Amino acid sequence: MTALAETVWLRVCAMAELTREQGVAALLPDANQVAVFRTHDDEVYAVGNVDPFSGAAVLSRGIVGDLAGIPVVASPMHKQHFDLRTGVCLDDPAVSVATYPVRVVDATILLGQP
């Protein structure tokens, strides 16, 4: 039996520093870029920052919203919508971005990295 990798929690920013319906980019120690979002109801999500359609690292600058109850970010490049919970593109379900675990502890947003 192998041991499961323990998640390392990295500080992104204080919750108060991330405006509702906005995103911020974070650089992980492995050089991956992550887009972290705060929704209108203070839920926090993290997905890969690179738009798979354009290859540009821009999702953190996308438009955060809700489509039929699904929290989404619309890419600023071509406006495809990505489900913030799963990373799946709602406009083309064959395409997705990575998702990352997030949590808020003592009003600080933490990003999980295995």
Image (cartoon, grey):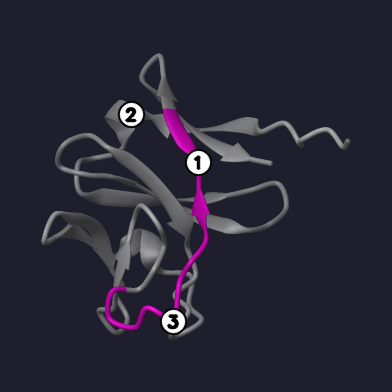
Amino acid type at image mark 3: Ala
User: Which residue is at 60% across, 30% downward?
Assistant: 9
Q: Earlier in the sequence, mark 2 or mark 3?
A: 2
Q: Quadrant of residue 108?
A: top left
- As drawn, the residue found furthest toward the right would be 1
Q: Closest to the observer: 14 or 36?
A: 36
How far, Cα to Cα, is label 3 from label 1? Answer: 22 Å
Left or right of residue 20, residue 3 in this image: right
Q: Earlier in the sequence, mark 3 or mark 1?
A: 3
Quadrant of the snapshot with the N terminus: top right
Q: Is residue 114 above or below residue 81?
A: above
Quadrant of the snapshot with the C terminus: top right
Q: Count all numbered tags in the image, as a single digit.
A: 3
User: Which residue is at 41% across, 62% downward?
Assistant: 87
Q: Is residue 71 above or below residue 91?
A: above
Q: Secondary structure at mark 3?
A: loop
The disc placed on residue 101 is 1
Q: Earlier in the sequence, mark 1 or mark 2?
A: 2
The residue carrying pointer 2 sits among few (fewer than 14), some (14 to 19) or many (20 or more) residues within 10 Å by Cα, namely some
Badge 3 is on which residue? 94
Disc 2, disc 3: CB below 8 Å? no
The disc placed on residue 15 is 2
Amino acid type at image mark 1: Pro
Left or right of residue 91, residue 14 in this image: right
How far, Cα to Cα, is label 2 from label 3? Answer: 33 Å
Amino acid type at image mark 2: Met
Stretch of the chain drawn in magenta: 90-103
